[in-house]
Amino acid sequence: MASLASIKKSLIEQLEKKGADVDAFRDLIDTYMYYTKLERQMQKDIKKKGLSYEAVSATGKTYIKDNPNVKNAIACNKQRLAILAQLDLTTKTVEMECDDKL
């Protein structure tokens, strides 16, 4: 899994290559990173508890409860994808480094 620092650096580099390195887009990158951190925390919880887990009701009965982080992680991922779309960063638009020494 890529580090958060390398992801942020990569996104900033893409803005710079597009000539779009402005505060508004940097703020979107910060928001993207926030959702990335949240999603990773949710993924850890899902790995720990599973898709569902046993919970105890107020009356003391045990029941199976869906892990809400499954839906929350999906929502975070949707937000991240929306931010990438807003920044026009797709596999078709990513600018790669060229090695002119070939």
Image: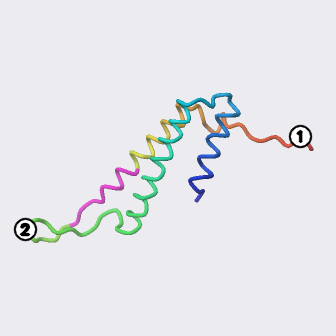
Foreground residue among 60 and 19: 19
Residue 82: x and y, percent? 48, 36
Foreground residue among 8 and 53: 8
* Residue located farthest toward the front when viewing the structure as drawn: 23
Residue at mark 2 to residue at mark 1: CA–CA distance: 70 Å
Are discs 2 and 1 less than 8 Å apart at CB?
no
Q: Quadrant of residue 68?
A: bottom left
Report the magenta residues as a range.
Answer: 64-73
Is residue 38 depicted above or below 53 in this figure? above
Foreground residue among 27 and 41: 27
- Element type at marker 1? loop
Q: Looking at the magenta stretch, what is its main secondary structure?
A: helix
- Residue at 42% from the left image edge and 59% from the top image edge: 41
Quadrant holding the N terminus: bottom right
Residue under numbered circle 1: 100
Residue 27: x and y, percent? 51, 36
- Element type at marker 2? loop
Q: Earlier in the sequence, mark 2 or mark 1?
A: 2
Q: Is 55 covered by the magenta stretch?
A: no
Residue 90: x and y, percent? 61, 37
Residue 33 as seen in the image, left or right of residue 48: right
Residue 49 as seen in the image, left or right of residue 11: left
- Residue at 39% from the left image edge and 45% from the top image edge: 75
* Residue located farthest toward the right when viewing the structure as drawn: 102
Q: Residue 59: give its label.
A: 2
- Residue at 41% from the left image edge and 66% from the top image edge: 47
